[in-house]
Image (cartoon, rainbow, N blue to C red):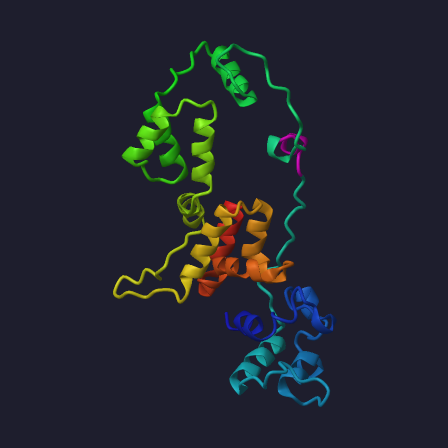
Amino acid sequence: MRVRPLLAKHCYACHTDAKMGGLQLDTREHALAVIVPGDPGKSRMVAAISYTDAKLKMPPSGKLADADIETLTTWIKDGAVWPTTPTKAPLYTITREQRAFWAFQPVQRTEAPRTGKWARTDIDHFILAKLDAKKLKPAAPADRRTLIRRAYFDLTGLPPTFAEVQAFAADRSPDAFARVVDRLLASPRYGERWGRHWLDIARYSDDKLNPTEEEPYPAAFRYRDWVVRAFNDDMPYDKFVMAQIAGDQMPEAAQYQAGLGFYALSPEFQDDRVDATTRSS
């Protein structure tokens, strides 16, 4: 019960996967390179931890406490019992059915089906084809007051003013609605509305949520504002994700570095950050 914690604390950082000096101490078979079960005097590990060999002193950060040296020496003297031997997990094989999953297929152009007069765009044709297959009818067209309110709430989360509703209702030009949408997409409110969705996914908070006192994250607003700005600037998604992982390593890093707040705001919870990265991206 005492040997493994000692090895984990003082040896595993260098002598497991890193294999520094060609040595691993993660299994008994590997450890036999520096121990002779039953004979501490012939075990290089004992010489190293005792600092009796001028060229081999381990750990290099400083000699172990005498009690720890005694523990390892006694363990070797008693036969270096290793209670469990880790086994390698079987190699995971991706099946043909898994490879066929739609998300892993190359993007392909699909011709829109030809449907009724209700459809105005290719997207409408796809929607109407599915409705027809289920013997359903499209909903009636929205009146202009409802239409502009839907656009405002969807794109900015805010209602239009009375004057904006009245102006749209009176504007009968063919591109009236398109101009409303373009104006909303250009509004700073658009990034604030849709950036909040990402901030929720990223588990963002201005505060550390201490139940006993207010404890804000220093400069947390910089990451929040960067996310909002990224949406307003229509930043490509791949750059948006990359900036939050390695923004300081990207070309023109100055415009991406604030994205590193995704990890920097809670460095003590990096496992949670990794979990959020793999679930959200």
Point 34% across, 30% down: residue: 167
Compared to residue 31, the image places residue 244 above or below, namely above
Point 30% across, 34% down: residue: 163
| Left or right: 23 in relation to 142 | right
Q: Based on the displayed image, in which of its 4 quarters is residue 97 positioned?
A: top right
| Left or right: 236 in relation to 273 | right
Measured from the top left, where is residue 170 in percent x and y?
35, 24
Q: Based on the displayed image, in which of its 4 quarters is residue 32 positioned?
A: bottom right
Compared to residue 264, the image places residue 143 above or below, namely above
Measured from the top left, where is residue 161 in percent x and y?
30, 36
Instruction: Let me know if residue 233 appears in the view.
Output: yes
Choose between 151 and 256: the one closer to the eye: 151
Look at the image and say whether residue 123 sits in the magenta stretch.
no
Look at the image and say whether residue 95 sits in the magenta stretch.
yes
Measured from the top left, where is residue 247 in percent x and y?
58, 59
How many numbered marks are there? 0
Point 62% across, 76% down: residue: 76
Magenta stretch bounds: 94-101
Point 60% across, 83% down: residue: 61
Choose between 257 and 155: the one closer to the eye: 155
Compared to residue 227, the image places residue 108 above or below, namely above
Instruction: Let me know if residue 43 appears in the view.
Output: no
Choose between 161 and 252: the one closer to the eye: 161
Q: Based on the displayed image, in which of its 4 quarters is residue 53 positioned?
A: bottom right
Compared to residue 207, the image places residue 201 above or below, namely above
